Amino acid sequence: MEFVNSADFATHLDEQDELKAFRNEFLIPQHQGKDMIYLCGNSLGLQPKAAQLEISRQLANWQNLAVEGWFQGSEPWLSYHQQLLPTLAGIMGAQPAEVTVMNSLTVNLHLLMVSFYKPEGKRFKILMEGGAFPSDQYAVKSQVKFHGYDPKDAVIEVIPCEGENTLRTEDIVAKIAQHADELALVLFSGINYYTGQFFDVQAITAGAHRAGAYAGFDLAHAAGNVPLQLNNWGADFAAWCSYKYMNSGPGGISGIFVHQKHHANKTFDRFAGWWGYRNDSRFKMAPGFEPETGAEGWQVSTSPILLMATHKAALDIVERAGGVTVLREKAIRLTAYLEFLIDDINREAGEELFKIITPRNAGERGSQLSIICKQNGKLFFDQLVKNGVLGDWREPDVIRLSPVPLYNTFTDVYRAARFLSDAVHHVSS
Ligand SMILES: *Cc1c(COP(=O)(O)O)cnc(C)c1O
């Protein structure tokens, strides 16, 4: 599509947008009496209006049914999470039995590594992307230490080539092959939080399996952002949070995926708890752990119903919008429009003031552009904030902007870029 740098053109795109009605299902934060231009959905998605209603319904059940709420009412809490699984499975490209919701993300990475990181003999290493989200680095390093290894020996990080910001798939796959007989696990993010690079999950999975290692993914920035095919791609496990592109609230419940090829194996090591016990006989409270088949067998503790209620409200919207593939079409155009406008600022300035480090190819990124500011980065960011544009600042010089198809408009993107352009004049005068 040919883009035009004008407010009218942005309005025109908004009028044609088939998802435009969904913005009204979210509470948009206010700035000086007007809607904020919120481009931070990669960090915390906005609140669906229905979240309050779903929570109120469960508070009413608690009030009226108290402990009987586990078994009674229109949505008994015992099986409450199961209502979420079909939509979640669609988002992940999974069978419903391959996914469940539980705990929070880093906790789930630990629990899944208990099952899928089984160092033995020479095969004790974990390969991951360099510059992974800090929590993932801490989790991985503490896991290898827990098994008695030194992270310096046991963690292999793949870093970009000299002068590049993102990884090449062939380099990731080659690095896996190079260490084939030493790897126990390949653990990658789906989308890197810093650069916004969408990795080739299928190629990384295939590479890990050729090496004889398990392939696991942290999908924090991919879930609800890009279409996924975890079942087809053959990933062994994955975990994600629900509060970024899935709009399910701060600290919202996490989800996990365990591929069906592992479901028959009841002897998988796992840190068990009663909520992972067979659904049909959990309340016999018998000694000896018998896991439920599928991802639910990794559950540990009692369902946090109030967190699940906000997740339900948010997933309902994705479902009604037609799923992630529908969101993705708009996301690609929103992100491309933002890219076009930022390139325009550079063109006008006659130099690359803002260097986009996120891949230029739409297939290798989600709804995010990470922009290195050549100079005065924090000043530009502060100017944006002053004008009601909220992105996300990463030291020392990166602004991340994430236009989210469910609630952002092309006009949001246009105005954000316009304020950035104004800031260039403001800062340089
Ligand atoms: C957001 C994010 C996290 C956060 O983990 P929590 O346990 O939910 O705090 C972890 N890893 C990645 C890659 C993330 O993007």
Image (spheres, grey):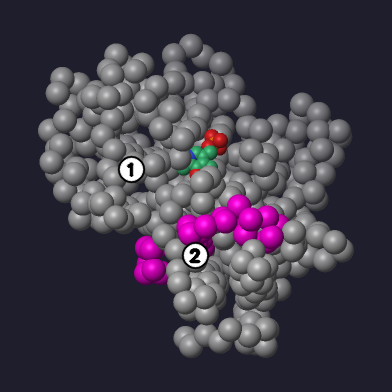
Q: Is residue 384 magenta?
A: yes
Provide residue 177's location: percent of width, then percent of height. 14, 43
Q: Is residue 2 magenta?
A: no
- Is 382 on the left-hand or right-hand side of 136? right
- Is 263 on the left-hand or right-hand side of 280? left
Residue 152 visible in the picture:
yes
Q: In the rendered structure, which amino acid carries the disc numbered 1?
A: Glu
- Of badges 2 and 1, the one in the foreground is 2
Provide residue 111's location: percent of width, then percent of height. 44, 27
Badge 2 crowding class, 10 Å Cα cut-off, few under 14, some 14 to 19, many 20 or more, is many
Q: Residue at x 49, y 25 (%)?
A: 277
Q: Looking at the picture, does residue 185 appear above or below residue 379? A: above
Q: In the rendered structure, which amino acid carries the disc numbered 2?
A: Phe
Is label 2 in contact with label 1 (beta carbons under 8 Å)? Answer: no
Residue 223 visible in the picture:
no
Q: Looking at the picture, does residue 291 appear above or below residue 178? A: above
* Mark sitting on residue 101: none
Residue ID for mark 2: 354
Q: Quadrant of residue 229?
A: bottom left
Decide which of 337, 161 is in the foreground and name it.
Answer: 161
Residue ID for mark 1: 129
Helix, strand or loop at label 1? It is strand
> Is the C terminus in the top left, top right, bottom left or bottom right quadrant?
bottom right
Decide which of 37, 110 is in the foreground and name it.
Answer: 37
Q: Give the residues drawn in magenta, as a range.
A: 359-385
Q: Residue at x 32, y 46 (%)?
A: 235
Q: Looking at the picture, does residue 293 appear above or below residue 405? A: above
Provide residue 137's location: percent of width, then percent of height. 41, 32
Tell me which numbered mark, 2 or 1, is placed earlier along the sequence.
1
Helix, strand or loop at label 2? It is strand
Decide which of 360, 213 is in the foreground and name it.
Answer: 360
Distance (Cα) linking label 2 and label 1: 25 Å
